[in-house]
Image (tube, rainbow, N blue to C red):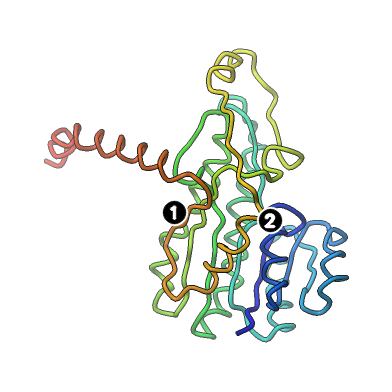
Amino acid sequence: MTKNWFITGTSKGFGREWTEAALERGDRVAATARDAASLRPLVERYGDAVLPLQLDVTDRGAAAGAVRRAVAEFGSLDVLVNNAGYGHFGMVEELTEEEVRAQLETNFFGALWLTQAALPVLRRQGRGRIIQVTSEGGIRAFPGIGAYHASKWAVEGLSESLRQEVAGFGIDVICLEPGPYRTDFGGASVRQSEPDPAYDGVREATRIEWDLGDPRATRAPMLELADTDDPPRRMFFGKSFAAVEAEYRERLDGWRKWEPVALAAFG
């Protein structure tokens, strides 16, 4: 059965790959980007199957209008993919108020505004799926990208509550947690705080050589997430599991060690 998608951040990266994957199999996609010109090749290739929408996800009114237009065009909405976002690099002390607010406006509030816009539609239908693209960085953290982590952890927490609120309406909520990939996250899309020389040693000591995945390889897995009758609550893309498992075991060990103190604090 043909699915109707709404995907944000489709000018490049994951969003472009998933949009093309859906269109290639005959689905329809409302594809958003800050620059509508970047969507022209999709229209030329797929015609009316793609609805190109210029959208700044931080604009709540525009987000609601874009969802209304997509539903008016397609008649229904099956899958919302909140993918738009970017990475901001900077030690916590280096972050300006403007930088932190901008990171949250896009990565967190952008996802919230689209989610709120889609929920009435999905509730009326009695079905639908919301895929929140968080990150491996939505459940663990590294030095130098604290603002990014804060935005993605916020989406994870919001989605945990949302999942319980809307399950009875036939709406699934999946937190998709990709690891490092060859996308624009560390390239043109990245933003950077003014570096403080006091942290040069930290930067050097914590530098990581990432094993980067191929974004094209995520096409079929994304379609499977959209189609499965048994959707996961959380899903990694890539090789994140072993490292995350080790970190969570360490957390459990810490909680167990300090449990006597925790219970003493109960009274």
Q: Residue at x 47, y 53 (%)?
A: 156
| Quadrant of the rendered image containing residue 249 | top left
In the picture of the structure, the residue carrying the numbered disc 2 is 58
Could you tell me residue 61's position as x and y percent?
A: 70, 66
Q: Amino acid at mark 1?
A: Gly
Name the one closer to the observer, 64 or 164: 164
Q: Around disc 2, counting alpha carbons within 10 Å, would you say few (fewer than 14), some (14 to 19), or many (20 or more)?
A: many
For the N terminus, which image quadrant?
bottom right
Q: Answer with left or right where residue 257 lies relative to residue 231.
A: left
Secondary element at tag 2 = loop
Name the one closer to the observer, 84 or 198: 84
Of the residues under marks 2 and 1, which one precedes in the sequence? 2
Name the one closer to the observer, 190 or 224: 224
Q: Around disc 1, counting alpha carbons within 10 Å, would you say few (fewer than 14), some (14 to 19), or many (20 or more)?
A: few
Name the one closer to the observer, 68 or 10: 10
Separation of disc 2 and disc 1 at Cα? 19 Å
Query: What label does residue 26 carry, if any?
Result: none
Q: Amino acid at mark 2?
A: Thr
Q: Answer with left or right where residue 20 lies relative to residue 150.
A: right
For the C terminus, which image quadrant?
top left
Q: Answer with left or right where residue 164 lies relative to residue 42.
A: left
Q: Residue at x 74, y 64 (%)?
A: 32
Q: Residue at x 46, y 60 (%)?
A: 159
Could you tell me residue 153's position as x and y percent?
A: 48, 47
Query: What label does residue 157 carry, if any?
Result: 1
Could you tell me residue 240's position as x and y percent?
A: 47, 44
Could you tell me residue 34's position as x and y percent?
A: 79, 56
Compared to residue 214, the image places residue 219 above or below, namely below
Compared to residue 129, the image places residue 264 above or below, namely above
